[in-house]
Amino acid sequence: MKKIIIAIDGYSSSGKSTMARDLARRIGYVYVDSGAMYRAVTLYAIRHGFADADSGVDTRALVESLPEIRISFTPAGADGIQHTLLNGEDVEKRSAT
């Protein structure tokens, strides 16, 4: 069965994420949380010394490291929580909203 990608657009605070998470759960799709992806890359940059509060981000080093960064999502369970994995490590500790 070929799966499709569904993108949802709309005004801020209009419930796009809530609706997208519910839809993904109901039809068996993975909800791709772009904010979680950005947080995972930021965590990678901090852990590898590419970003800090004093000197900012070493963009060149981070871009060169992109092939080493693997981000994936676990399916949301019955509790509605989906986790973000950075190179296999669960780095998403937020609760469902």
Image (spheres, rainbow, N blue to C red):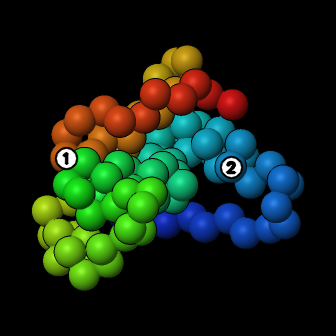
Residue at (80% x, 49% y) in the render: 15
Q: Residues within 10 Å of mark 1 (few under 14, many from 20)?
A: some
Element under label 1? loop
Extreme-left residue of the structure: 68
Residue 3: which quarter of the image? bottom left
**Residue 63 as seen in the image, left or right of residue 34:** left
Mark sitting earlier along the chain (1/2): 2
From this view, report whether residue 40 is shown above or below residue 75: below
State the residue position of label 2.
17
Residue at (57% x, 64% y) in the render: 6
Extreme-bottom residue of the structure: 60
- Numbered label tally: 2
Q: Amino acid at mark 1?
A: Asn
Residue 63 location (% of width, % of height): 25, 77
From this view, report whether residue 4 is shown above or below residue 49: below
State the residue position of label 1.
87
Q: Nearer the viewer, residue 60 or 20?
A: 60
Residue 17 location (% of width, % of height): 68, 49
Measured Cα–Cα span from mark 1 to mark 2:
24 Å
Residue 9 location (% of width, % of height): 73, 69
Q: Nearer the viewer, mark 1 or mark 2?
A: 1
Element under label 2? helix
Q: Amino acid at mark 2?
A: Ser
Q: Which mark is residue 14?
A: none
Residue 91: which quarter of the image? top left
Q: Which quarter of the image is occupied by the N terminus?
A: bottom left
Q: Which quarter of the image is occupied by the C terminus?
A: top right
Residue at (61% x, 28% y) in the render: 96
CB contact under 8 Å: marks 1 and 2: no
Q: Nearer the viewer, residue 19 or 83?
A: 83
Residue at (85% x, 54% y) in the render: 14
